[in-house]
Image: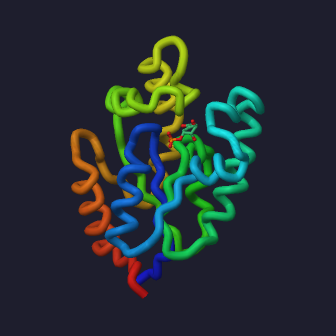
């Protein structure tokens, strides 16, 4: 058995990381921490504000610093931002005891789910959000595919997705219980 101390959820905007994350944390008896929330708390500004006032590069630096700290925490489910895991090589150099899980979603469903949170996702704003999502997702797929485990979320309830992740962790002999 490989001892696991943290589960890192990765995937596109709207893939369900911040919905599935707290439920998975409950199932494992762990905490859930979302990268975006941690960046906002650290910077004292919302993600759209950071994009607008400091620019995307500033946000990416802040996100990278917060992620490096959170990846040292134990007994935690982490919800990464959709862009963080898209940097090539990132999922291949995670600290020991981390298992990455890719929540798969198509561009249409991602945009549909993100519709309720318009304003929180500056990268999908302006112009045609679906065209933007399709392009961005296609660019990012090679990086997301390097996650250790993958679960389809399309048309499925968050509870169903959590159930599958728990089964996958067990079947890969990933021990979260010590
Ligand atoms: C981003 C995704 C967002 C947020 C920021 C950039 C991206 O997080 O970090 O708007 O580049 O895909 P979610 O994936 O939680 O929406």
The residue drawn where x is 45% and y is 18% is: 131
- Residue 152 vs 96, above or below: the answer is above
The residue drawn where x is 24% and y is 62% is: 163
Q: Nearer the viewer, residue 145 or 33?
A: 33
Question: What quarter of the picture does the N terminus occupy?
Answer: bottom left
Asked if residue 171 lies left or right of residue 48, the reply is left
- Residue 156 vs 2, above or below: the answer is above
Asked if residue 92 lies left or right of residue 69, the reply is left
Q: Position of residue 93 (x, y in %)?
A: 62, 62
Numbered marks: total: 0
The residue drawn where x is 40% and y is 59% is: 22
Question: What quarter of the picture does the C terminus occupy?
Answer: bottom left
Outermost residue to the bottom: 178
Outermost residue to the front: 44
- Residue 176 vs 34, above or below: the answer is below
Residue 99 in sight in this render: no
Asked if residue 105 lies left or right of residue 35, the reply is left
Q: Position of residue 133 (x, y in %)?
A: 46, 26
Q: Quadrant of ligand 1?
A: top right
Outermost residue to the top: 127
The residue drawn where x is 49% and y is 54% is: 79
Q: Position of residue 3 (x, y in %)?
A: 46, 81
């Amino acid at each position: 058995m490989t001892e696991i101390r943290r589960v890192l959820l990765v995937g596109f905007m709207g893939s369900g990381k911040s919905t599935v994350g707290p439920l998975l944390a409950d199932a494992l008896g762990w905490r859930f921490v979302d990268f975006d929330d941690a960046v906002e708390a650290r910077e004292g500004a919302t993600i759209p504000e950071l994009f607008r006032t400091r620019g995307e590069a500033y946000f990416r630096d802040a996100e990278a610093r917060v992620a490096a700290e959170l990846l040292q925490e134990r007994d935690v489910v982490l919800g990464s931002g959709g862009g963080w895991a898209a940097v090539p090589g990132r999922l291949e150099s995670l600290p020991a005891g981390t298992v990455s899980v890719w929540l798969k979603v198509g561009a249409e469903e991602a945009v549909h789910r993100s519709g309720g949170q318009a304003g929180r996702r500056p990268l999908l704003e302006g112009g045609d959000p679906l065209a933007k999502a399709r392009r961005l997702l296609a660019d990012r797929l090679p990086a997301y595919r390097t996650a250790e485990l993958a679960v389809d979320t399309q048309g499925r309830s968050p509870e169903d997705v959590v159930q599958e992740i728990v089964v996958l962790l067990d079947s890969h002999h990933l021990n979260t219980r010590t």
